[in-house]
C-alpha cells in the first residue's frame, strides 16, 4: 500500500461476481494525463481468508501496473503482462511470480495468526 501511495494509480476495490475460475482480477479502468484508475474485483462468495489473500495478490498487480507508466488501458496492460507475466491455461490471462508470492505470503501470515 505504501508503494501505491506514491504513484499516479488509484485503486478501486469491489467484490462481486467474476466469470471463469479467477478469485480476483485487476485491470485499468481509465487514465488521464495525471491519474490511472485500476479496479480490483474479488470473487464473492468466498471466505474471509481467501478474500484477504486474493486482495494481497491483486494489490501486487496494482503495484506492477504502477511501475509501468505506459500501461494506460486494456491493450497496453495486455502487452505489458505479455512481457512480464506467464500465460495461464486460457492464454488470455497472465500471472506474475511476484503476485503469486504476495498472495501466498498473506495466506501464510493469516494462518500464523489463527
Image (spheres, rainbow, N blue to C red):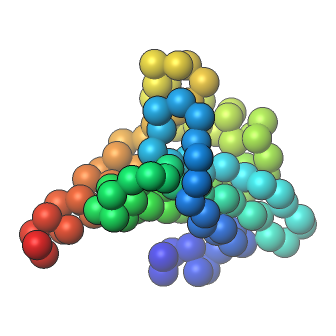
Q: Residue furthest front?
A: 45
Residue at point 18% right, 68% down?
109
Position of 77 with respect to 54 (left or right) is right
Position of 67 with respect to 8 (left or right) is left
Residue at point 68% right, 60% down?
38
Position of 98 with respect to 13 (left or right) is left
Quadrant in the rendering for residue 79: top right
Query: Would residue 37 be visible to someone looking at this image?
Result: yes
Foreground: 23 or 89?
Answer: 23
From the top left corner, tell me how far across and down residue 8 is, in percent: 72, 72
Compared to residue 110, the image places residue 107 above or below, namely: above
Compared to residue 42, the image places residue 82 above or below, namely: above
Query: Would residue 61 be visible to someone looking at this image?
Result: no
Residue at point 48% right, 76% down?
1
Quadrant in the rendering for residue 12: bottom right
Q: Residue furthest right?
A: 33
From the top left corner, tell me how far across and down residue 78 is, in percent: 67, 34
From the top left corner, tell me how far across and down residue 108 is, in percent: 17, 60
From the top left corner, tell me how far across and down residue 64 is, in percent: 54, 55
Residue at point 30% right, 51% down?
101
* Image quarter (top left, top right, bottom left or bottom right) of the C terminus: bottom left
Q: How many marks?
A: 0
Compared to residue 76, the image places residue 53 above or below, namely: below
Amino acid at each position: 500500500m505504501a508503494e501505491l501511495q506514491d504513484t499516479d494509480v488509484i485503486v478501486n476495490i469491489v467484490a462481486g461476481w467474476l466469470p471463469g475460475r479467477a478469485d480476483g482480477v485487476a485491470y485499468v479502468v481509465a487514465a488521464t494525463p495525471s491519474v490511472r484508475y485500476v479496479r480490483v474485483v474479488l470473487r464473492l462468495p468466498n471466505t474471509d481468508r481467501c478474500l484477504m489473500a486474493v486482495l494481497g495478490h491483486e494489490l501486487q498487480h496494482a503495484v506492477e501496473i504502477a511501475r509501468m507508466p505506459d500501461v494506460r488501458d486494456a491493450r497496453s496492460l495486455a502487452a505489458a503482462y505479455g512481457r512480464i507475466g506467464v500465460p495461464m491455461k486460457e492464454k488470455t490471462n497472465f500471472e506474475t511470480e511476484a503476485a503469486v508470492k504476495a498472495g501466498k505470503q498473506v495466506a501464510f501470515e493469516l494462518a500464523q495468526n489463527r
